[in-house]
Each structure stands twice: as structure tokens, then as C-alpha cells.
Image (cartoon, grey):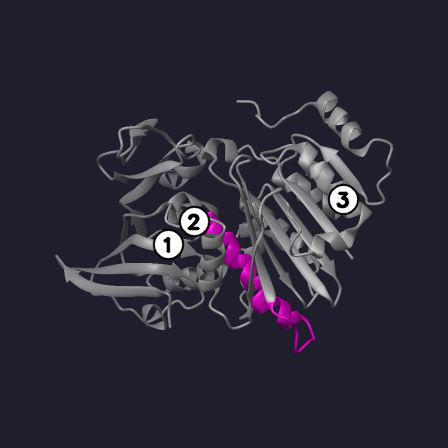
Amino acid sequence: MSKLQFSTAQENGKTVLTLIGQIDESFPQELHNLKPAGDMVINMDQVKMINSLGIREWIKFMGSVSATKIEFVKCPKIFIDQVNMVQGFITPNCKITSFYVPYFNEDSNVEKNVLYSFGKEFGDGFLNVAGSTKGDDGSELDLDVVEQKYFKFLKN
Amino acid sequence: MSNIFHLGKVEADKQVTDVFGDSELSCNYKVTDNMSALDCLSLIRDRKVTHIVQNSIQGLTDKLQFLKAVDYKREDYFDPNLSLLNTDVVCVPFTLTEDRSDVIQKAFSLAYLDLDMTKYQYLFQVATELVMNAQIDAPKISQKTSVPNSMLIVEKNMAKGLVSISTIDHYGSLDPYKMLENIYAAHMHGFRDSMSKNSIGAGLGSALIYEHVDSLIMGVVPDVMTRVSAVLPYGISEKKINQIQKSIHIIKG
């Protein structure tokens, strides 16, 4: 059984694909045969892990939907890390319109993931990175990425 | 910003003298500083050094003590109860067909590692690659048909900001230099171009592990046993993690 659950829905003429779980060698074959009607939105919010065999499956999947305009939303850090590290992890027909930026307090081991959205924190030619944020308990959390590395994908 | 782990030659030499004293080690090692992840790989490729040691989140003294211990008695490294971080060791045996996630979740839970925090997803990723090597790659390469269960070993030392994750299998089929070659290829040519198209492995697992480690330890007793350990940061900010100076150990029994 695949460790990646998925569902599709039609919204405003777009196919919305929601992925939940792990991207690994059990990647669902149905996704390789997916024929989206119109543009596609992929919601990555609940993707928890990507392993080396999953990277290979994902690149195959990207190849199979290369003719479709794709918008990625709510991308977790683990996804952004692969986008930055693996050339071709997302193809030129894709655009990331929202992604999480981690904040962390080393003393209290508390984290918070802040959603950055296109047109708000970043856009064509701009990126506004907050150096810190407030945790749910009011404590100060520092930006927990190396900016030159983490936001590299925005330049491409 | 200068590297916070950079010790300088005088201090590094002092620590070497403090730990090694007059003893002469039999292995080919290099204690160094300010060496990039790629340079470490190149040094092993070109000069056949078996141990590269740098001060990092895991301190130089701890690494030198480990080096001295395994140089004196290599078989100790293959003892599942060996502590790499001076803490309690959690061992979880697993079979070739057991669900990897279940095995890892059990070990992490026993070691009080927080799997809910997205910050620590890389620990799960590294553990997955190590267990995959033991479950998929090792038996494929080896001729052995019946072996005891493999083991996932986890340690956490909050005070040192470190976690170690190891696997032991009883195939003894690891070629450490081939593993390093895969990592080197991924660094030189990129992950995509070094990816294998065959059905066994993508060839990226080792590079994913190396990406996150402070120390990578690869031990093999040919046809008997393999142990691979990843010493990783825990509870440390990404800005510090980015300054890690990697160490590599190759231990052949």
C-alpha cells in the first residue's frame, strides 16, 4: 500500500491534487497516469517525508505532467529543500505560490512554520523575510534557515 | 561570519596531544580544520585517508577519543551497545520485510526523539535511508541467504546537541569507498545527474545522509557485518548547522 495518499477535486476549472504522507518508492502509479483537466494546483501541506527513491518517482511524475501548468501551495521545508538541492525536482511549468518558513527557539526547542505567500511576503522581484516571529506562547523565535540557501529557488 | 567551529591550529594540536599523548595510531588519519564537505570527500578519494576529523558540534576531543578507541580495537565499533555520545543506547531489531516507518518510530520513541516537529524531519529521512540500505541494498549485493536480524540504534544527547543513528546488518557487503563515490558524484554533478535509473536504489541515499551529518562512520567486516552511523545535530539552529565541519571515518575489520 502506498504511503502517499492523494485526492483530486475540481475548483474554478483547475484540478486540485492534495498529497498526504511520504513520497517514497510506494508512490502511487495512478499519479503517473494522471491527466489533469486544465491547470493543476498541488497542495503539499501534509507531505511529511521524501526519501531517495521518492525523489526518483517524483521526477518521473513531474515528467508525466510537464504539459500542465502547475501551482504548488503550502510547500513544507522538506519539499523546498529538495527543490533547492535536486535540479529538475520541479519543472519550468511549475510555480510555487506559498511555502513554509521555519522559525525556532534553540533554548526552548519550540518551532513555528510561517506560511509565505506570493504577493505578500514574496513576489516578482521582491522577498520580505522576517528575522523573527512570535511563538504561540509569545516567545521570540528566530528565522531557522540560511537565507541564501533556502530562498534560492525563488531566483529560478 | 567566521565559522564558529574553527579551532585554529594551536588549539587543535593541543587537543590531539591531550588525547593521543605518545601513542602512535596505526590508521591513516588527518585532523584538520575549515575543510568543506566536498574537500573531505576529495581527500579520502585522492589520498586514501581513512579518518578525517574536524571540530564541530561534536567536539574534536570526543572525535579523537573515538578514533583512538577504534584504532586500538576496531571490533568495538560493531558492538551494538557501543555509545557514540555517552548516553543510553536504544537498539531495535528489524527484518528485511518489516515496515521501515514502524521500526524508526519505535526506536525514536524509545529514544525520546520528537517526530512531530518538522525541524527534525531530516532525522527520519536519514534513518529511512540507513534502514533501506540494510533492507534492500545489503542483501542484494551479498550472496548470503540467511542472516540474523539487522538493528537500528539510536542515541540522543541533548546537552551536546547531537543524535546518532546507526544500522548494523550481518551481510558485510558495504564498500565504503563506493558509498563515498556516490556522495562525491552527487556533489560534483548534482543529485539529478548522479541518480541511478535502475530498480534497486536511486544512489542518492548516501548523499542525503551526508548532507545532514556532523560525522559519518562506515564500518565493515567483509561478509560478516556492516555498521553505518550518522552523528547529527539536534536542537541546534540552522545557522549553526550550516557551519558544521564534517568528519568521516572508515573502519575495516
Kindly indicate whether the residue at mark 1 contacts the one at mark 2 (C-beta within 8 angstroms). Answer: yes
| Location of residue B148 by image quarter | bottom right
Amino acid type for the residue under numbered disc 3: Ala
Amino acid type for the residue under numbered disc 1: Lys
Disc 2: CA contacts within 10 A as few (<14), some (14-19) or many (>=20): some
Location of mark 2 (residue)? B121
Query: How much space separates mark 2 and mark 1, taking CA atoms?
Result: 7 Å
Tell me where residue B145 appears, x and y as whole percent. Answer: 66, 78
Q: Which residue lies at the image location 24% right of the left edge and 39% below the top edge? A: A118
Amino acid type for the residue under numbered disc 2: Gln
* Number of the label disc, if any, that sits on residue A86: none
Q: Nearer the viewer, mark 1 or mark 3?
A: 3
What residue span does the magenta drawing correspond to?
A: B122-149
* Disc 3 chain ID: B
Disc 3: CA contacts within 10 A as few (<14), some (14-19) or many (>=20): some
- Report helix, strand or loop for mark 3: helix
Query: How much space separates mark 1 and mark 3, taking CA atoms?
Result: 38 Å
Query: How much space separates mark 2 and mark 3, taking CA atoms?
Result: 32 Å
On whether disc 2 and disc 3 are found on a single subunit, the reply is yes
Location of mark 3 (residue)? B69
As drawn, B76 above or below B147: above
